Image (spheres, rainbow, N blue to C red):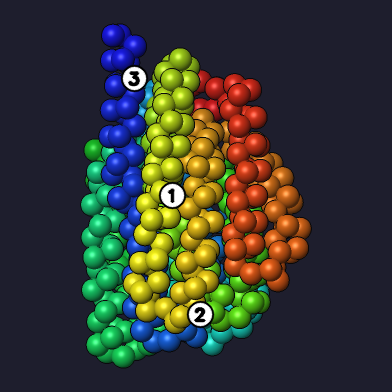
Amino acid sequence: MDEKKHKENIDGEILRLAVPAFFALVAEPLFLLTDAMIVGRLGTEHQAGLTIAGQAMATLVGCCVFLAYATTAAVARQTGAGRLREATRQGVDGIWLALLLGTAIALVGIPLSPDIVGLLGESTYATEYLRVALLGTPGMLVVLAGTGVLRGLQNGRFPLQVSLAMFAANLVLNVLFVLVFGWGIAGSAWGTVTAQTGGALVYLGAVVRLARKHGSGLRPDLRGLRAAATSGFALVVRTVTLQATLVLSTRAAAQQGADTAAAYGISSRIWLLSAFLLDAVAIAGQSLLGRHLGAGDVARARAVTRRMLWWGLGAACAFGGVLLVTRAWIPPLFDADPAVADLLTRALVVVALIQPLGGLVFVLDGVLIGAGDMRYLAWAGVVTLVAFAPVVWLVSGLGIVALWASLGWWMFVRLVTLGVRARSGRWLVTGAVR
């Protein structure tokens, strides 16, 4: 009975953070899905352009995801150790770093938009979208950092509320700018930029209130900025390897023509939706593992890890099953041409079948991030990229099913590298600072 209550208590902890994290995370792929549905009314070439530009933005901003993940882990450790003033100070440093990085990316990226798009596949529409979308980079990164602060403090509800508001604003503005005002694909970008900037302002207000409550300063601290950047460097390497994988697969799809690029773009957004479902459990892991290790409770950290792996596997199998059953109903949602619809339906079979791998991979990734095991994650990312690159090159001319199969291989290699580390126990380091 005590064991049953213990599991129920852990499940309650996981759900308290994972459920709001899922709905907050799902807003991001829903941004892209609603954009795709609206832009799809403009034609296949516009849809392909959105695929290319969307991957470019995901790569540029994804390299800065450490602003959320590293901040969550660091703030959670301080929270577990009972040091709320230090926890909030780290959050403030993360916000300043987000503003600086976001501004730098926008200033460099806008004039280089045609060159960035050219790396993935030529598209005038992609360049048009990317030039506008880059204006929202500072806001996007502030949202990442602000989300990390709140989750590190074990508050999952606030990020959920902000994400839902941003999604609603993005939907309304995209319909207005694209379909009513007739701004084309640039209108979709303007809608997203406006929604993200509004969300960033909300997070800024929340972090300022927390800093004042716990007596933390608001001015940028050079030492804190340097520490935040240094701690996040290994995560940058890890994220760059992940984004490089997606860039290689997007390029392989684009080289096979507009139909394949459009079908891959839609299927990758659906895969991203499932990834965020699984990442919700991983984010719960980041918060809980950081807190328990910060408090020195290794036994609790192990127990939480075991339960999250079951949760991740169950959620992945459920999503995969639903996708297999409903895959024929998805192409009409995007107003896909018959050729695109046929490719998409076939691709979704593979996307569904690789879900169980993702269920374990995302949880293990979140556990190691929460434990602050960033250096190992960086090396593991390099190994998986090296294993993936020749495979995607070999299958690049074999169609969209082979392309998704290569991504399944990538997930399998990730599972092996992360599983080996998890079994070793070397990531279980206690204390306020790893």
Q: Position of residue 206 (x, y in %)?
A: 26, 49
SS at circle 2: helix
Q: Nearer the viewer, mark 3 or mark 2?
A: 2
Q: Which numbered circle lies on residue 320?
A: 1
Q: Position of residue 286 (x, y in %)?
A: 44, 35
In percent of width and height, residue 37 lies at: 35, 75
Pick whichever of labels 3 and 2 is earlier in the sequence: 3
* Up-down relation of residue 324 to residue 103 (above or below): above
Please identify the quarter of the rendering in which residue 284 is found: top left
Quarter containing the N terminus: top left
Nearer the observer, 304 or 274:
274
Disc 3 or disc 1, which is closer to the eye? 1
| Figure quadrant of the C terminus | top right
Q: Nearer the viewer, residue 96 or 396?
A: 396
Q: Is residue 323 visible?
A: yes
Label 3 with label 1: CB-CB less than 8 Å = no
Q: What separation in Å lies between label 3 and label 1 (alpha carbons)? A: 26 Å
Answer left or right for 292 relative to 59.
Answer: left
The amino acid sitting under disc 1 is Gly
- How would you rate the neighbour count of disc 1 (Cα within 10 Å): few for under 14, some for 14-19, many for 20 or more? many
Q: Secondary structure at mark 3?
A: helix
> Residue flagged by tag 2: what amino acid is it?
Ala
* Residue bearing the label numbered 2: 339
Compute the Cα span from label 3 to label 2.
Answer: 49 Å
Q: CA distance from mark 2 to mark 1?
A: 24 Å
Residue at 27 percent of width and 49 percent of height: 160
**Residue drawn at (56%, 84%), measured in percent from left and top?**
123
Q: Which residue is mark 3?
A: 7
Residue drawn at x 28%, y 86% as measured from the top left? 179
Kind of residue at disc 3:
Lys
